Every structure is written in C-alpha cells, then in structure tokens.
Amino acid sequence: MAAMNLNLPIITPVYIDGSKLRSLISYPSLLKHLQTTLPAISTKMESPIRHNHSVNQSSSLLLMPSWSQSDSFQYIGVKIVTTFPENSSRNLPGVHASYLLFDSLTGKPLSIMDGSELTHWRTSCVSALASKYLSRNDVEVLVMIGAGSLAEYLIKAHLCVRPSLKRVIIWNRNGEKAVNLVKKLQEEGISNVGFEYGECVEEIVKVGDVISCATSSGKPIVKGVELKEGVHLDLVGSFTPLMRECDDEAIKRGKVFVDNEAALVEAGELVGAFSRGVIAKEEICGSLVDLVTGKKNGRNGDKEITVFKSVGSAVVDIVSAQFVYETYLEKNNI
C-alpha cells in the first residue's frame, strides 16, 4: 500500500448562508450572468430530470443534480429540497433547501450554500429575464398572486427589468400575509412604485399588465377569460401535474414559453392542457434559452398575450451557484 501523503492541503468547503449570499449578488448582476452564461453552457451540461419523492401525502423530497462536460465550466452541483406546503399553518417556510457545489475535475467539495436563498434569486431572475423578452415595454401594473417567501424576490426582479411599473398589487389566500408584504415593501421606500393589497383576485387579474403567480395551488386561480390584451402571465408555483395556477383558457389564449423541457411533463397547467387537447406540445413556442439567443421571437405586438411557465432547472441552479461562489472568491481575494 502506498504511503499516505500527509502534506496534502485540507479542503474546507465555503459555507455561504442566506445573509452572505444576499451580500454577494444583485438582480442586475445575476440577470446579466444568466443572460450571458446560459446560452453558452446549457448544451454542455448533464442534467437528469428532477428526482421527486413523496415523503407523505402532501410533502416531497426533490433532488436536482447537474454537472458540466466542458473544460471551461468545471463544476458539479446538486440541490436538495424539501417541500412541506402545510408549513404555512406552522408559520414556517414551505420549502427548505441546500446547495452543494463540487469541482468536476477532482470531485472536491467547494461550497455549501443556502439553497432556499439561491432558489429565490435564480427563480425570480429567470422570470424577470423571460419578462424582458415577453412583456410590453410600457407595462405599469404588476399583479403578484401569492405572498410567500418567493413573492418579494419576484416583485423586485420584475421591477428591475421593467422600470415602467408603477403599481404592484398583491393577493394571497391568507390576506394577512399579503397585507404584511405590502407594508414591508412600502417601508423599504422603493421609488415611484405604489404597493397595494388586492382583496378580490378576479378583479386584480383584469388590470394586470404582468401577472406573476407563486403558489402551490391545485386549482386554477387565474382565469383566461379575465386576462386583458397584452398581458404577460408568469407561472412559477407548480412543479407537478397535480398543481395548477391558471386554467386552460389562459394557456389557449397565450403564446407559451417554458424555462426548460421538464415543464412539458411536470407543470400541471401544461400536462393537463395537453391531455385535454387544448394545445399540443408542438405548439409550445420555445424555451428561455431560445428567447435569449434570438432563436425564437418573443412578443409580437402590444395586444398579444404571453405566458412563461417555469418549473426550475438544475442548470440554472449550477450557473447561479457558480456566480455566487466565484463572486465570493473575488471579493475575498482567494
């Protein structure tokens, strides 16, 4: 047996908690990174379909691995997520996550990150990046359906890409949560934007120029008949065929894009629409990368209704984690 080399350095993974992660990135910086990096790296990544395991009747364990086959992007990553929707009654977040980043050349661990914080940033920036191509340039009213932990991030990301927004109306089944989020955002004093609580979801949907949904609903909240011309509908919440944030009419009326192909088999809005013959898979207009690269056109005219459905992507996770980790190294001169 060969003698052990006692002089090898001890590798200590960098721990990046939520607070530290927030200090390392901003919406403009992550949006720019995703826009430039995703097209270059997406075809060089291995990313199996998300492992989704039922822990009990309402809760799930998700595993999202991804690794690079490129010498210019030497990372392996995996996100471990638990989703417990009933935590809202316990006054706890419904989602908990950790992200593990490794060196793909040696397999050594590089970082352990707050996966929930990373997910909030990457999810909201993916939605905002899609909105950059799919929403009108002159939008004024953002409707936020859901007031959970992701809602604030989605609102701020959308405001970043659409500075024309003047009103943000927030609705939640538990009205108190929506009111509290309105107060929080009002106290932050975001300039030139008014924040309001919407009591009737049907009424506020009718006035939205951008409608962003982040719920765990199993029944449609947004009805297609209520969508006005030129609206952009951003669907974030569902990630299983049993979850659904809008009805078939919304899908039928919209020009639909997805964050990645997994949405075609995971998103309840789409899986149901396919099975009922509302639209065919071939009628999905393209992916986020298609939009960014210009392979597919986004909005064609001010009256067109656009829909973006995201279910999450391990590729976006690892690209976002790479950005956080490398920013950490740069700021700490490592």
Image (cartoon, grey):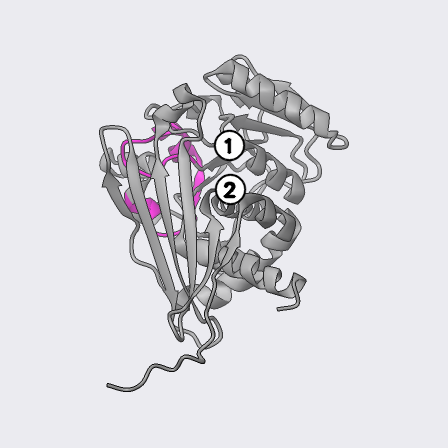
Q: Position of residue 104 (x, y in %)?
A: 40, 71
Residue 271 vertical placement versus 188 (above, below)? below
Please give the name of the residue rendered at 57% of the width and 62% of the height, measured from the top-left corner. 36
Q: Answer yes or no: is residue 296 visible.
A: no
Please give the name of the residue rendered at 59% of the width and 31% of the height, measured from the top-left corner. 209
Is residue 264 a member of the stretch shown in magenta?
Answer: yes
Q: Position of residue 243 (x, y in %)?
A: 32, 31
Q: Position of residue 229 (x, y in %)?
A: 54, 30
Helix or strand or loop: what does disc 1 sit on?
loop
Disc 2 crowd rating (10 Å Cα; few below 14, some 14-19, many 20+) is: some
Residue type marked 2: His
For marks 2 and 1 on the same chain, the one whose residue lies earlier in the sequence: 2
Q: Answer yes or no: is residue 176 visible.
A: yes
Q: Quadrant of the C terminus?
A: bottom right
Q: Quadrant of the N terminus?
A: bottom left
Residue 120's disc is 2
Disc 1 crowd rating (10 Å Cα; few below 14, some 14-19, many 20+) is: some
Q: Position of residue 248 (x, y in %)?
A: 34, 29
Please give the name of the residue rendered at 52% of the width and 26% of the height, measured from the top-left corner. 147
Residue type marked 1: Ser
Q: Are marks 2 and 1 in contact (CB under 8 Å)?
A: yes
Q: Is residue 164 left or right of residue 235?
A: right
**Residue identified by numbered label 1:** 149
Magenta segment? 237-265
Q: Is residue 166 left or right of residue 144?
A: right
Label 2 to label 1, Cα distance in Å?
A: 8 Å
